[in-house]
Image (cartoon, grey):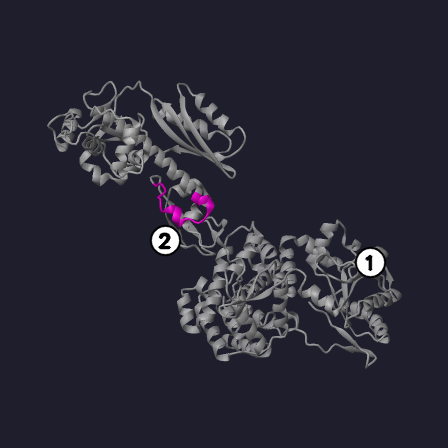
């Protein structure tokens, strides 16, 4: 609140009322209670719009008001009032306290329509135009962000508010919306009051300060303070035993002798004063550890001199010190020694005639303008798109925000037009702000995709990602995310990263994890392929050293032996075909060695395998037939107790897979003619290899605890441990020998009990 101003003129030689235009406070405006009569409410809004705004389209506002009433006709506020009274009051605040234009008023009237009624953004665009629709859309997004969300990263949310919009009026409508909600907060439950008050104190009030909207900032803080610390609020209010009118009279009496003496010395000046608002007083009490009686600066007076001479400030200080007794330890000379940010002023505290301590700030007009508009930021115009001016950020919003305030206070037709055309909030455009399903904020680079988001959540989520829902709609993995999006990652235990994910992802974290997983997968395929080739070569009685094999696979158009083995391990090249190709190179005139069972086609061999097992293949010593060759798939490492299935191959016999193996599931239709049903023998004496994936907090001693926990279980041997750490997390693959599924579950239980371990699961290559 800005208190009455006095200005002295040398030519007049006496104190005169300031003639400068000032904005009226909301408390000075005519009272009106919305909700009693729709036509009366509309007439009142139109009258206020004409009174406060230079640009006011009566027809547009009238249509918006009637649309608002119709859209919310079935809705009531928690207080029981017709719901339209809320947007009507928001529009009134936009008219009176942050006046700009009629489009802002229309957007205020319609700001809840899309969120709370059956009307869509498309309806608003058709009825009121794209400009109004975009403001309502921005305000709706901000509402969605804060809906049922605990505020834990206030600065990030302030950045989010900026990045959500391209039109400054979105923020202004949200200020007005929040201000009216805070003024009527008593109707809400205690829990909702506290949540809204915290959100207002941490987000909206500081943001209003950055926009230079001091009156709104102070009121939001006081209303939040009243909810969050009601006892302290009431106590401070009770101790301020003078009313507002009495305080104004005190400042008037205090200023009068100063004004008279300065006039006598021929100094042009302006004096304005104000009492501190309640929350400001409370903060001083808390930070200084003092009671209200011990605070020196409950009242503040500014003495602004219309001069370019710094010495005039010391002259004014001398005059004030002659009239009132100064408190020596409270004198600060920021003119001779400015603050680091360039702030200059003289600060002193004096004892008034009736014994009150009053803080006075004395400065020139230039110092005052710098303190109000240029302390915290430096902005510049940047020519873009052939000279079009737009605002770009350097460090903060202060200078820009104060320019906004100046435009508001002197809002004319041209000023409002200048604001709307010039302000494009291009701040923080190198980052986007997206949310998890639980409402946690994630900050990602601009252009990030669901893959980046998934790996930002956790490497395991990223590795198993098969798709994403953005704002409830399924999108492809290369979809570009935008600020305000809520992202749900869809996962499958059978999924593994694809090679093109590296191209889609843009974050270093995602790319690193994808490369590592793909490399691990490739190494497993190479190892499996090498094993398949060695068995095939042995069966064909081929004796080829590694150097000769390298030359042969190059002739087969493979870049290296690793590529050859990888093709075998992935199934793109069968061992039989590989054997034939190598034989043709080594013995081009020889026939391919025949293999058991001889003279059998593949289909006949499959039927033979099924007949020999009677549809059930008992692995181990109780197997009805020991003539059928079998081996265990390394991709899923089955152990007794798992549901298993067999894939008939020529040369490798039957490959035993877990029934849930992603390779079996993905290729089920293709492999169906070669599938045979399997079961385990009733008794097993062998050891089986199992792979366990484990993730958790990276801390000293974690690896030792993991290995100790495993070997503490009877008959458990560890074959290998491969653990990598990223940031504060670790992820590893533990390979162990177990006798059956129950044995493996005991290992899982032990690992889960280790402090910091988050997930333990079977690993599939």
Q: Is residue 590 visible?
A: yes
Give the percent coordinates (x, y) of residue 40. Answer: 53, 77
Report the quarter where the N terminus lies: bottom right
Q: Nearer the viewer, residue 99 or 525?
A: 525
- Residue 445 location (% of width, % of height): 48, 52
- The magenta region covers 495-511
Instruction: Let me know if residue 356 is in the magenta part.
Output: no
- Residue 758 seen by the camera: no
Residue 675 falls in image quadrant: top left
- Tell me where residue 339 appears, x and y as whole percent: 74, 57
Residue depicted at 58% across the width and 63% down the height:
179
> Tag 1 or tag 2, which sits nearer the N-term?
1
- In the picture of the structure, the residue carrying the numbered disc 2 is 475
Q: Residue at x 73, y 54 (%)?
A: 284
Q: Quadrant of the C terminus?
A: top left
Q: Which residue is mark 1?
A: 331
Which percent across, then down, holds residue 343?
72, 61
Residue at coordinates 50% horizontally, 26% vertically from top-left?
A: 705
User: Is 671 situated left or right of 319 in this image?
Assistant: left
Label 2, secondary structure: give it.
Answer: strand
In depth, the one of 142 and 551 nearer the eye is: 551
**Image quadrant in which you'd find residue 498:** top left
Q: For this view, does 451 lie left or right of residue 429?
A: left
Left or right relative to 421: residue 278: right
Q: Is residue 504 magenta?
A: yes
Q: Residue at x 83, y 80 (%)?
A: 13
Q: Residue furthest bottom?
A: 12
């Amino acid at each position: 609140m800005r208190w009455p101003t006095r200005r002295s003129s040398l030519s007049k030689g006496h104190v005169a009322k300031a003639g400068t235009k000032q904005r009226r406070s909301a408390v000075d405006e005519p009272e009106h209670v919305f909700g009693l009569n729709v036509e009366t409410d509309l007439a009142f809004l139109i009258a206020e719009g004409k009174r406060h705004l230079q640009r006011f389209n009566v027809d547009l506002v009238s249509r918006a008001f009637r649309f608002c009433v119709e859209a919310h006709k079935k809705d009531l506020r928690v207080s029981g009032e017709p719901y339209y009274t809320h947007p009507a009051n928001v529009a009134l605040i936009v008219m009176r306290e942050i006046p700009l234009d009629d489009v802002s008023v229309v957007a205020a009237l319609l700001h809840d329509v899309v969120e709370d009624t059956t009307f869509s953004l498309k309806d608003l665009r058709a009825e009121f135009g794209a400009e109004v629709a975009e403001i309502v859309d921005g305000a709706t997004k901000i509402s969605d962000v804060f809906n049922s969300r605990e505020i834990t990263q206030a600065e990030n949310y302030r950045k989010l508010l900026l990045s959500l919009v391209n039109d400054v009026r979105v923020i202004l409508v949200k200020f007005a919306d929040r201000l009216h909600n805070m003024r009527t907060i008593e109707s809400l439950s205690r829990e909702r009051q506290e949540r809204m008050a915290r959100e207002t104190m941490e987000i909206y009030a500081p943001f209003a300060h950055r926009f230079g909207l001091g009156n709104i900032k102070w009121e939001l803080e006081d209303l939040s303070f009243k909810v969050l610390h009601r006892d302290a609020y009431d106590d401070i209010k009770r101790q301020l035993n003078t009313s507002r009118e009495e305080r104004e009279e005190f400042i008037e009496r205090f200023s009068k002798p100063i004004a008279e003496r300065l006039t006598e010395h021929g100094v042009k000046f302006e004096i304005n004063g104000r009492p501190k608002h309640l929350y400001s007083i409370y903060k001083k009490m808390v930070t200084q550890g003092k009671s209200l009686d011990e605070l020196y600066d409950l009242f503040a007076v500014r003495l602004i001199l219309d001069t370019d001479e710094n010495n005039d400030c010391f002259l004014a200080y001398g005059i004030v010190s002659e009239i009132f007794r100064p408190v020596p330890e409270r004198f600060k000379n920021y003119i001779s020694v400015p603050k680091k940010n360039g702030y200059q002023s003289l600060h002193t505290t004096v004892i008034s005639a009736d014994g009150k301590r009053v803080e006075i700030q004395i400065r020139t007009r230039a110092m005052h303008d710098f303190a109000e508009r240029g302390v915290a930021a430096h902005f510049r115009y940047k020519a873009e798109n052939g000279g079009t001016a737009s605002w770009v950020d350097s460090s903060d919003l202060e200078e820009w925000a104060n320019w906004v305030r100046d435009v508001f206070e002197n809002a004319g037709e041209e000023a409002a037009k200048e604001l709307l055309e010039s302000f494009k909030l291009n701040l923080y455009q190198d980052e986007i702000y997206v949310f998890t399903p639980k409402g946690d904020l994630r900050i990602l680079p601009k252009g990030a995709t669901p893959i980046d988001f998934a790996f930002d959540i956790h490497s395991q989520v990223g590795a198993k990602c098969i798709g994403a829902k953005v704002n409830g709609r399924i999108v492809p993995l290369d979809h570009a995310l935008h600020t305000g999006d809520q992202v749900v990652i869809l996962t499958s235990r059978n999924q593994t990263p694809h090679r093109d994910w590296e191209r889609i992802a843009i974050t270093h974290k995602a790319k690193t994890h994808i490369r590592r997983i793909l490399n691990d997968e490739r190494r497993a395929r190479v190892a499996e392929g090498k094993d398949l080739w060695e068995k095939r070569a042995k069966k064909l009685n081929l004796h080829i050293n590694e150097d000769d094999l390298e030359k042969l696979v190059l002739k087969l158009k493979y870049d290296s032996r690793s590529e050859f083995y990888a093709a075998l391990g992935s199934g793109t090249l069968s061992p039989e075909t590989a054997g034939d190709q190598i034989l043709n190179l080594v013995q081009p005139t020889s026939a391919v060695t025949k293999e058991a069972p001889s003279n059998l086609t593949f289909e006949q061999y499959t039927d033979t395998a099924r007949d020999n097992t009677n549809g059930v293949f008992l692995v181990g010593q109780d197997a009805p037939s020991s003539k059928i060759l079998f081996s265990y798939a390394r991709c899923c490492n089955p152990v007794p107790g798992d549901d298993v299935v067999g894939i008939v191959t020529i040369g490798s016999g039957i490959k035993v897979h877990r029934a849930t193996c992603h390779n079996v599931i993905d290729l089920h239709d293709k492999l169906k003619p070669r599938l045979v049903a399997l079961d385990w023998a009733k008794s097993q004496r062998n050891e089986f290899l199992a792979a366990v994936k484990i993730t958790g907090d990276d801390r000293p001693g974690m690896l030792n605890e993991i290995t100790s926990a495993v070997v503490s279980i009877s008959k458990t041997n560890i074959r290998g441990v491969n653990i990598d750490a990223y940031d504060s997390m670790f992820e590893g693959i533990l390979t162990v020998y177990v006798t059956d599924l129950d044995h493996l579950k005991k290992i899982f239980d032990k690992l889960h009990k280790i402090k910091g371990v988050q997930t333990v699961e079977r690993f599939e290559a």
